[in-house]
Image (tube, rainbow, N blue to C red):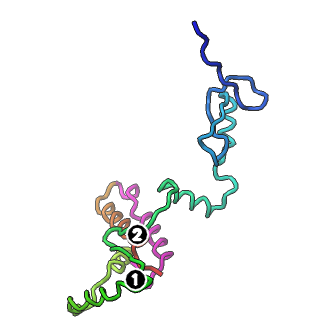
Amino acid sequence: MPPGPLPRVCAWPGCEAEGAFRAPRSKDSLRDYQWLCLDHVREFNRAWDYFRGMTSDDIDRHRRDDVVWHRPTWRTAVQGCGPRIHDPLGLLDGLADLETERRPPPTRRLETETERMLGRLGLDATAVLTDVKQRYKQLAKRLHPDLHGGDRRAEERLKLINEAYTYLLHCGELA
């Protein structure tokens, strides 16, 4: 019978046990592994702190970037926001004039989508992003399904609040 591969030795200094469990060498190279025995992989896991040395802002940024696998992203039209085109040379200025010539001006000022979504949160047009976040947290806590025992009206209200909050974060023209 041919001999099989030799067992790995634990990478812990001074340990001669079999290294059956892999652990990353550092947070910067998570796919570069070292092999540890059961006792040392437990000790390694207890001491592992991926975010050691990072500020709370760095951790928040990392968590947000984690959603898109740390790849660059760009804003898109979300829930009817429409495209936002950067036109530094003013090439599209004439198109806006043509659009207003075709349509007669409205007889009354219509409520914008941002104002409508602010209204869902009980805020007026003077609200800023911090007001929106604070109000959303209050309403989300008050309307949480666990507090209402499955009340459908509270659940529907929470859905509308979530939709408004998402819109205002991504599309709203808040100062």
107 within the magenta span: no
Q: Earlier in the sequence, mark 1 or mark 2?
A: 1
Q: Amino acid at mark 2?
A: Tyr
Which one is nearer the viewer's eye here, 152 or 158? Answer: 158
User: At 40% from the left edge and 84% from the top edge, which residue is drawn?
Assistant: 125
Q: Residues within 10 Å of mark 2 (few under 14, many from 20)?
A: many
Question: Relative to 80, does residue 32 appear above or below in the rendering?
Answer: above
Which one is nearer the viewer's eye here, 110 or 64? Answer: 64
Which one is nearer the viewer's eye here, 150 or 106? Answer: 106
- Element under label 2? helix
How far apart are the alpha carbons under marks 1 and 2? 14 Å
User: At 59% from the left edge and 41% from the top edge, which residue is drawn?
Assistant: 31
Q: Are marks 1 and 2 in contact (CB under 8 Å)?
A: no
Can you say which quadrant of the picture contains the N terminus? top right
User: Which residue bears the numbered disc 1?
Assistant: 124
- Element under label 1? loop
Position in image of residue 17 (x %, y %): 71, 23
Position in image of residue 23 (x %, y %): 63, 37
View extreme (right): residue? 14
User: At 66% from the left edge and 47% from the top edge, which residue is drawn?
Assistant: 49
Question: Relative to 139, does residue 107 appear above or below in the rendering?
Answer: below
Question: Relative to 157, does residue 121 appear above or below in the rendering?
Answer: below
Segment colored magenta: 122-149
User: At 44% from the left edge and 66% from the top edge, which residue is drawn?
Assistant: 74
User: Which residue bears the numbered disc 2?
Assistant: 165
Question: Relative to 80, does residue 52 appear above or below in the rendering?
Answer: above
Q: Amino acid at mark 1?
A: Asp
